[in-house]
Amino acid sequence: MSEEKQTAEKQPSGKRKSKKLVITGIVVVALVAVGVGMMVWHEQPSFCSTMCHIEQTYVDNYAQDQNAPGTDKYGHEVSNTNAMMAVLHRSTKATAKPELVCVDCHVPNFVELAHDGMNYVSGSYPLPRDERSASGLQSWDGKTGESFCANENCHVYLLGDDGNLSYAKLADSTKTRAFNPHEQHHPNLSLECTDCHKGHRASTVVCTGCHEHENVAIPDGWLTYDESESLMKETFPGAQAA
């Protein structure tokens, strides 16, 4: 019988159990620490660029200085970064949080993450990423497109008594402008927030697709409908803007 085995057999069973408990405790603490670390990292924009969007483009876009010249997610110049909602909303006094991060808007849905992961592995994850509408962003959670912008955490003042976006409140929020873009000028025309308000590229005054609005100033950094269409055709030849 080896000396190590004889020594082990001589040790009291209680002492051996105590060592096992200590080792088990260390392993559990280590796993908890790793899990907590992953959760903390998961909340950071760097997680998104590393694990999801593969490249740094989106994080660099989001982290640009506000109210300054910059570039969109496709590398196109933008005269004012405030025209991109991801930049405009990063540092804000409109919510309880002084800074919004990716997951505040793009709430993780594990089924969606698994779907995108499989697409990436299979080579069906296009870069640069095409645009998604608000309803597309919310579809995995079974929510309406309007809830992407107006919910219990963001733009809550636009919610009606039923908890959904109130178009009357939306129109009232910009009623002092020379041209009220949120007035329901065409009730039968179905538009989503993201048709005009773009997250990672210059927002678009969709109304200019039909109306010249020659006496109404285009917000700094924003694009007319034709300019937006031209930019997207340049980025995705043969495809229509989303």
Image: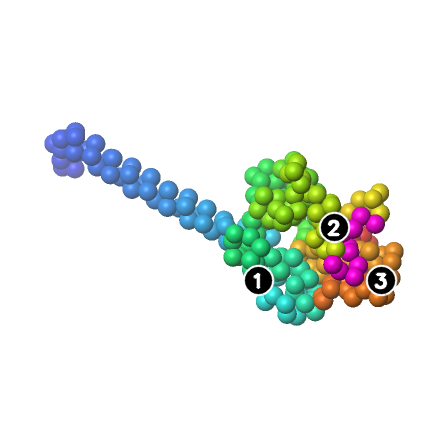
Numbered circle sitting on residue 63: 1
Q: Circle 2 is placed at which residue position?
A: 171
In reply to whether residue 181 is colored magenta, the answer given is yes
Q: Which amino acid does label 1 sit on?
A: Ala
Magenta residues?
176-185
Distance from disc 1 to disc 2, alpha carbons, whole Å, reads 30 Å
Q: Is mark 1 on a helix, strand or loop?
A: loop
Residue 77 percent across, percent down from the top left = 70, 68
Q: Circle 3 is placed at which residue position?
A: 213
Q: What element carries label 3?
A: loop
Q: In this view, does 79 lie to the left or right of 228?
A: left
Nearer mark to the viewer, of 3 and 2 = 2
Residue 70 percent across, percent down from the top left = 65, 68
Q: Which amino acid does label 2 sit on?
A: Ala
Q: Is residue 15 left or right of residue 81?
A: left
Judging from the image, the colouring scheme is rainbow
Q: Which residue is drawn at 13% across and 31% down?
A: 12
